[in-house]
């Protein structure tokens, strides 16, 4: 069975003085989703943006907005992100004791629900919510900043997760990887079974963004493993 391979540039590395144009630019050059990093200065040591920015981007009708919440008590703000037009929302397992309830809250809003895991967080936390997930976001750097170096230990984590999902009848749950993704690390992760490739600095920092998106896509497709094998 063939699973999708999607490229999601992260606007964290975009020029915020012209955010709308930046989003249009990468979408016209092949981006599948737009990844929006929401940081609160508590869960991570950085502050970015909130639902208002998502709402403005949604009005532009460019590509699905993939909202990655790096905030404490995500359940408090999720209704506002649903209202703003998010297509998918992920929150961190480390940020709330109410993972099951929060996944339900997202799905009740007819939005794709994802659980994000820091590099050191074990996969076990997913065990009893596999039926409640549309995707899992595996952090491949520590959350908080763009432009960090990919953590190699996360390749084995993604492979283990893909095998587990397929073995337990959850092959339709997608795996998103986020942090330090470029054509080479994208290839490694595609081979391990990842489906959604977030790339911030690699895309927005490239002199030719379209060429970079195509490069990531061709490496990811060339190295993809068909699961279940
Ligand atoms: C980090 C964010 C990432 C970040 C990725 O906390 O979740 O989405 O923008 O940036 P790069 O691709 O530059 O590592
Ligand atoms: Zn992110």
Image (spheres, helix red, strand yellow):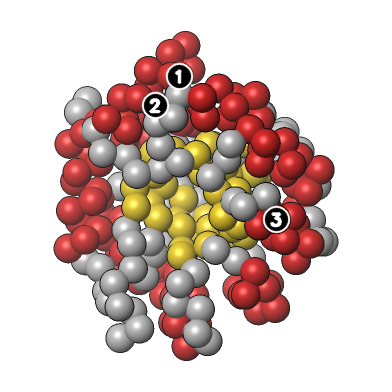
Density class for disc 1 (Cα within 10 Å; few <14, some 14-19, many ≥20) is some
- In the rendering, which numbered label is found on residue 108? 3
Residue 147, position as x, y percentages in the image: 43, 37
Mark 3 Cβ inside 8 Å of ligand 2: no
The quadrant where residue 63 appears: top left
Q: Which residue is mark 1?
A: 19
156 lies above or below 222: below
Nearest to N terminus: mark 3 or mark 1: 1
Q: Secondary structure at mark 2?
A: helix
- In the rendering, which numbered label is found on residue 217? none
Nearest to N terminus: mark 3 or mark 2: 2
- In the rendering, which numbered label is found on residue 23? 2
Disc 3 from disc 2: Cα separation: 28 Å
Density class for disc 3 (Cα within 10 Å; few <14, some 14-19, many ≥20) is few
Residue 85, position as x, y percentages in the image: 58, 36
Disc 2 from disc 1: Cα separation: 6 Å
Q: Secondary structure at mark 1?
A: helix
The answer to whether the residues at label 2 and label 1 have Cβ atoms under 8 Å apart is yes
Residue at figure coordinates x 21%, y 66% from the top left: 223
In this view, the residue in front, 162 or 112, is 112
Residue 209, position as x, y percentages in the image: 25, 31
Mark 1 Cβ inside 8 Å of ligand 1: no
168 lies above or below 206: below
- Lateral position of residue 218 relative to residue 77, left or right: left
Disc 3 from disc 1: Cα separation: 30 Å
Viewer-nearest of labels 3 and 1? 3
Density class for disc 2 (Cα within 10 Å; few <14, some 14-19, many ≥20) is many
In this view, the residue in front, 214 or 42, is 214
Residue at figure coordinates x 55%, y 49% from the top left: 88
Q: State whether residue 77 appears in this view.
A: yes
């Amino acid at each position: 069975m063939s699973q999708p391979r999607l490229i999601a540039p992260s606007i964290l590395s975009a020029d915020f003085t012209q955010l709308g144009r930046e989003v249009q630019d990468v979408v016209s050059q092949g981006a599948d989703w737009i990844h929006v990093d929401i940081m609160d200065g508590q869960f991570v040591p950085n502050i970015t943006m909130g639902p208002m920015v998502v709402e403005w981007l949604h009005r532009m009708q460019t590509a699905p907005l993939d909202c990655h919440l790096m905030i404490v008590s995500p359940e408090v703000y999720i209704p506002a992100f649903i209202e703003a037009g998010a297509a998918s929302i992920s929150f961190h397992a480390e940020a709330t004791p109410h993972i099951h309830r929060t996944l339900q809250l997202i799905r009740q809003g007819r939005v794709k629900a994802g659980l994000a895991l820091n590099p050191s967080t074990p996969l076990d936390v997913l065990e009893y919510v596999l039926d409640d997930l549309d995707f899992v976001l595996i952090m491949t750097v520590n959350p908080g900043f763009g432009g960090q170096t990919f953590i190699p230990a996360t390749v084995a984590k993604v492979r283990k997760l893909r095998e587990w999902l397929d073995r337990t009848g959850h092959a339709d749950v997608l795996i998103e990887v986020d942090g330090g993704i470029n054509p080479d690390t994208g290839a490694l992760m595609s081979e391990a079974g990842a489906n959604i490739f977030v790339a911030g600095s690699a895309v927005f920092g490239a002199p030719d963004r379209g060429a970079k998106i195509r490069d990531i896509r061709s490496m990811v497709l060339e190295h993809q493993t068909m699961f279940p094998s």
